[in-house]
Image (cartoon, rainbow, N blue to C red):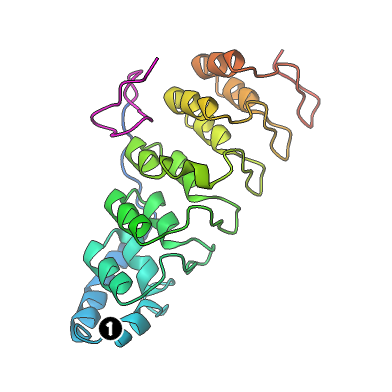
Amino acid sequence: MSRKKCSLCKGDVCIHEHGEKRTDTLQAIPDMAEQTMDLLEKLLKERENNPEEILQLASRSDLVGMDAFCLTAAVGHIEGMRRFLEAGKSPNDACAADGSTPLMLATQNRHVEAMEILLSYGADTTYLNTDGNTALILAIRTGDAKVVNTLWSYREQVDINHRNREGLTILHSAVEKRWETCVKIILSCGADVNSITDNGCTPLMLAAQKGDVKVAGVLIDGGADILIEDYLKTNNV
């Protein structure tokens, strides 16, 4: 049976079906970054008719600990980001300390329009940061359906069972958020319901730890093995 798409979340993944409420936006970039944007806007204006100098400015990392292009993506400064892209800046430059790409930074900070622009310029959804996270894992961790749906149409580009450096998958991330609808969608796309982290934790174990009966039921219906043991030799029984 086809699923009715939520008009608010604009895609398959919804946070409203079961009464979930959208969480407040988390701002991962310090307030000083917004102040730095005033300086960056001034520098961009001074170089308005010089694409080469704008491209050089995009790689400056002395403004707030990351290069100027990544900063525009992180704070969702659309005009500045467009200027850098039009000048020839690659959307895939990993320019943050943790190896995050502009797409990852825009995703973490829930800047959907910035994500869409980066994707239109060829942002690669398969890139990993130093923790082994893809943009899709980071999207699910936000708990924001609009952010997830922006990347969801690109899901075939990535391994749906990709494990980060801790062995966590997108399914683990959805269970961590207690996001029943998202768990169902991920399972329907072929995710391994018994994927095990480096410390032996399955999605079902994670749901049990959180006391999430609904998500645990979805996982069991999806074939979760209740007898798998973690590194302490405990299981879900």
**Which residue occupies the extreme right position in the image?**
233
Determine the residue positioned at 46% across, 62% down: 101
Q: In this view, does 82 lie to the left or right of 204?
A: left
Residue 190 image position (x, y, % from top left): 57, 29
- Within-10-Å neighbours for mark 1: few <14, some 14–19, many 20+: some
Q: Is residue 123 left or right of residue 164?
A: left
Considering the whole magenta stretch, tell me its main secondary structure.
Answer: loop
Residue 164 image position (x, y, % from top left): 62, 47
Amino acid type shown at disc 1: Pro
- Helix, strand or loop for disc 1: helix
Image position of 55 with respect to 188: above or below: below
Residue 208 magenta = no
Determine the residue positioned at 37% across, 55% down: 119
Determine the residue positioned at 37% across, 30% down: 12
Residue 11 magenta = yes
- In the picture, which quadrant includes the N terminus? top left
Q: What stretch is highlighted in magenta?
A: 1-20
Q: Mark 1 points at which residue?
A: 51
- In the picture, which quadrant includes the C terminus? top right
Determine the residue positioned at 26% across, 67% down: 82
Residue 133 image position (x, y, % from top left): 56, 50
User: In this orientation, which residue lies closer to the viewer: 190 or 113?
Assistant: 190
Residue 111 image position (x, y, % from top left): 31, 51
Indicate the quadrant where residue 187 lies: top right
User: In this orientation, which residue lies closer to the viewer: 153 or 108?
Assistant: 153
Q: In this view, does 101 lie to the left or right of 38?
A: right
Image position of 5 with respect to 97: above or below: above
